[in-house]
Image (cartoon, rainbow, N blue to C red):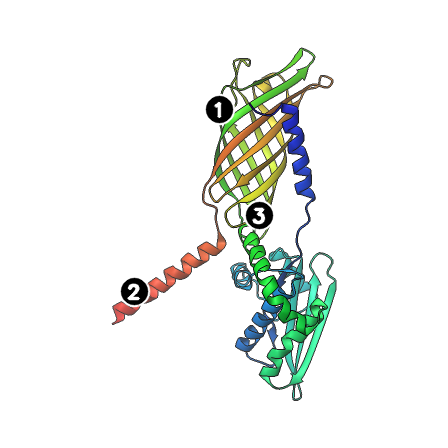
Amino acid sequence: MFLDYNMKKLILLVVSFVCFALPDDGSLAIVKLDALGISKKEARSLTERITSQMISCGKYTVLDRVNTDKILDEMKFQSSGCTDTKCAIEMGKILNAHYILVGSVSTFGNNFIMDCRIINVETSEAIKSASFTSRKNLDKLLQGTKNIVSQLCDIDIEEINNQSIENKKSNNLKKKALARSIYRTGGLYFGYNFFGEFKFDSGLGSGNDQYDNGGFTLGYEVGKLLSKNEFGISLDIGGFESSERSSSDSFLNSYWKRNFSKSRTYNFWTSLGYNIALGQLDKEDWVGKYSVGLGLEGDRFEIGCLINKSRSDAPESYFDVVRMFVNYNFPKFNYLDKKKKQQKKKQFQKKKNRRRNK
């Protein structure tokens, strides 16, 4: 037997409130150092060293550089030379990062100078800066990355090595948790409502009952690259049917969905939206109100609970529908997957052309 309707509604609203109130971790995107006095290959090596040491310091959730580079490339964003605040903020917004680390390596006389800054993407404030100077010796410059990171993280250089092993496992888990939400871009889904219950109160009476048949739902969600937010619209096909109702009840629902990724295999979400009453509800002059839901989503399937609320002009009149559903999510468009396929296709074509030339 399912929980009492009011109890289910209370649990749903409380959990939704808690989830919406959860703060995000301070995600940090690290951009390749601008090479003003060294080669691009050497700048890339220095950037990788800073990235691994920033992960070790444990103050930020560092976004994977391989993926961020691919995304910037896909967006046709030129990161080279992007060291000023305005450009860094624009890049941070594309990557959906809370903070962004930019820097450069230049030469002055017989010295190498490495400068780095961490910028708050939302406030445009440079919250940390660091500088390191050495003789023109690449080995010393490579060792100087620890000095840079110690300034940015406010820790001693020795602590970077001590924290490396301790933080490696936790940061890997964080990256895995981010991996699923980073590339969400929405998609089409088809659902079945396996349980439905309605409760109403109007001038003509009140009551509640379970539906005999929940019907199906068709929906589409749109998400921005690197964002945990999605926006969707859904339509009940067939609607809910009951012997107590002369025809089916259905809704057209538009909503905002917030994803809380926990691993590569599943994603917890909550939603808040506005729905329009259709079918028998529309005939009885019930009008739409808000909707609230939560669920657990895998790569293709998800299960969840949704409350659709409607009202009428009569004083304190309402008609609420609570449903349990299972959805099948059609494969979502993935920019990175598309790029990989294009690259493989080009590589295959090159090999094919070489064979022909031979």
- In the picture of the structure, the residue carrying the numbered disc 2 is 352
Q: Residues within 10 Å of mark 3 (few under 14, many from 20)?
A: many
Query: Which one is in front in this view, the residue at disc 3 or the one at disc 2?
Result: 3
Q: CA distance from mark 3 to mark 2?
A: 41 Å
Residue 261 image position (x, y, % from top left): 57, 48
Residue 191 image position (x, y, % from top left): 48, 33
Which is nearer the eye, 134 or 157? Answer: 157
Q: Residues within 10 Å of mark 2 (few under 14, many from 20)?
A: few
Label 1 or label 3, whichever comes before in sequence order: 1
Q: Quadrant of residue 169?
A: bottom right
Label 1 or label 2, whichever comes before in sequence order: 1
Q: Quadrant of residue 48?
A: bottom right
Residue 82 in sight here: no
In the figure, is residue 220 to the left or right of 13? left
Dot 3 falls on a residue whose secondary structure is strand
Residue 55 image position (x, y, % from top left): 61, 64
- In the picture of the structure, the residue carrying the numbered disc 3 is 261
Residues at marks 1 and 2 touching, judged by CB atoms closer than 8 Å = no
| Amino acid type of the residue that numbered disc 1 sits on in the rendered structure | Gly
Q: CA distance from mark 1 to mark 3?
A: 32 Å
Dot 2 falls on a residue whose secondary structure is helix
